[in-house]
Amino acid sequence: MLQQDAENYFQAKIDQDIKIEPKDWMPEAYRKTNIRQISQHAHSEIVGMLPEGNWITRAPTLKRKAILLAKVQDEAGHGLYLYAAAETLGISRDEMINDLHSGKAKYSSIFNYPTLTWADIGTIGWLVDGAAIINQVMLTRTSYGPYARAMVRICKEESFHQRQGFESLLVLSKGSAAQQAMCQDAINRWWWPALMMFGPKDSESTNSDQSMKWKIKRKTNDELRQQFVDMCAEQVKLLGMTLPDEKLHWNAQRGHYDFGEINWDEFWNVVKGNGPCNTERLAARRKAHEEGQWVREAAMAYAKKRSTAPPGEGLVRA
Amino acid sequence: MAAIQHQINFALSVADTTLILLHRNSECCGHGPVLEQDIAITNIALDLLGQSRNFYQYAAALINDVVKSGGAAALPALSEAFEGEVNEDTLAYLRNERAYKNLLLVEQPNGDWAQTILRQYLFSQYQLFLFEQLQYHEDTGLAAIATKSVKETAYHLRWSSEWVIRLGDGTGESHQRMLNAIGALWRYTGEMFIPADYEREMNINVELLQQQWSKSVKKVFKAATLSVPDWKIAAKMQTGGKQGIHTEQLGYILAVMQYMQRAYPGCEW
């Protein structure tokens, strides 16, 4: 088949909403874009464990500790499915992890912000998981089959996390004056970074057009962001809190909330590595990997010895 | 009344030990040597948290009953610390270092993966035999919790013993690291087998636990090409956890763990 025919056939499948599977022919750029996006998503899950993990040992009740531990563990599981989904495109987990550690691969900038108080944990659940879900619900219909299927499972868990986060803020909002202040402060700090999670404005986004044509993305950054603002502007009322944006108001004509301008200098600065915790997050990941080197070597050496040992000489049961 | 006090102390000792170990394990979350093992150790932390909550809830119910029936004077160490009813959180978050009855072993730092693994193994090997006994205890409340927990503990034991063997019989470096871990932790294993008064009163057969534990540890260490330290150095064994005499580690653990409840007393979360 000629290259052009192959591309036409590929695009025809996409246009008919037929999923692309690992063994199907695909344009090299489609493969690369998916590797970039899926691995970035996987890295976000793994790096995202750090800011939340920061509060596991200090969770205020045993029940909250259990919820948080389970949530962070879910994120690790999501990372695992996503690395596996990316591997179907012909890249190994080691390569992806090396790209993360070298700074070549990105992860969501939101995790470069610090978790300073307990209220940050509920706020991450509400706003950060909330923003992630809007993006991920769209991705359950993405054109690459393994990614879409991973997303279906991940979305179920993420919406559970979002409800838990909101519920935890609801308790704070009904609590003492100090708890209410803690809640509002966390919302103030996380609101704008959460809006930035949808990426640059459509007019500035370099990857959008082709990704829309290939149905890797099915809605633009600005559409998704608007959907998120509309959702949160209503939910925040239930908390009796406010969003830190004086320009936020309902526009009956558009049928949407209008909102203020994002600080794009801050956005690009954090993307470039200058956010409050970029250095710490990468250092923590590198440290875990480097300190795990001897462990992985030992596991391999042991597995090799076992594979050459006579049958029945496996691990003893204690 | 004395019998209830022993029951309460025993339940608290098991709850404290699992809570402190899960605290240590949860410090690894997001920092494990490989993603699958990060998930495994967090999973174990979650199981231990569930066990710990069950034992605290059991102890809290007993304490509340005693207080209600006017017997608070019999619980001096507890009744002074709290106002009103106690629950799992008051017991975990509002008792001080000297009231904690956890084993010294579980409060030791994570160190490297060898130390984290060995601590889990030495404890799980003990906890499995303890829960196997408790399953048949005449106290049906304790027996029910043990029955619920024993499968989880069997998994913790399988996972940690496999790692002990893998690291002991892995590379030269991993073997050496296991030796270092044994050097750091072995001295905290002795107290598991010195019965506290509440264990004796609760008819826990600690001598049997020691026999079973020693036999199993020997077997796993042999498979791991490690040798069991000579019991003649028993004089080096550290004790006191069961009576609330801890290493310096525990104070820091509680300072971190109890921070929110101490800073914002009496709040709902």
Image (tube, coloured by chain):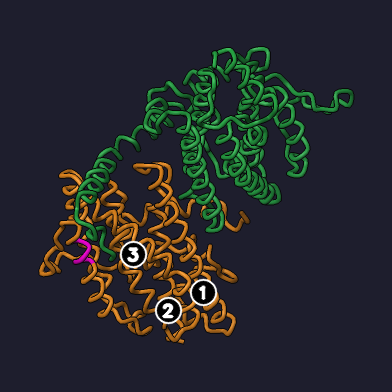
Report x, y in % for residue A254. 85, 23
Quick check: marks 2 and 3 in contact, CB under 8 Å? no
Q: Which quadrant of the structure image shows residue B3? A: bottom left
Q: Label 3: which residue?
A: B124
Residue at 54 percent across and 13 percent down: it is: A3
Q: Label 2: which residue?
A: B135
User: Could you tell me how far apart the alpha carbons at marks 2 and 3 are, in whole angstroms?
Assistant: 16 Å
Of the pair A151 and B32, the residue shown nearer to us: A151
Q: Comparing marks 1 and 3, which lies closer to the viewer?
A: 3
Amino acid, disc 3: Ser
Query: Which comes before the other along the chain, label 1 or label 3?
Result: 1
Of the pair B13 and A204, the residue shown nearer to us: A204
* Same chain assignment for discs 1 and 3: yes
Quick check: marks 2 and 1 in contact, CB under 8 Å? no
Where does the magenta region start and end? B217-221
| Element assignment for label 1 | helix
Which label belongs to residue A167?
none
Q: Label 1: which residue?
A: B58
What number of labels is visible? Answer: 3
Q: Is residue B79 above or below residue B16?
A: below
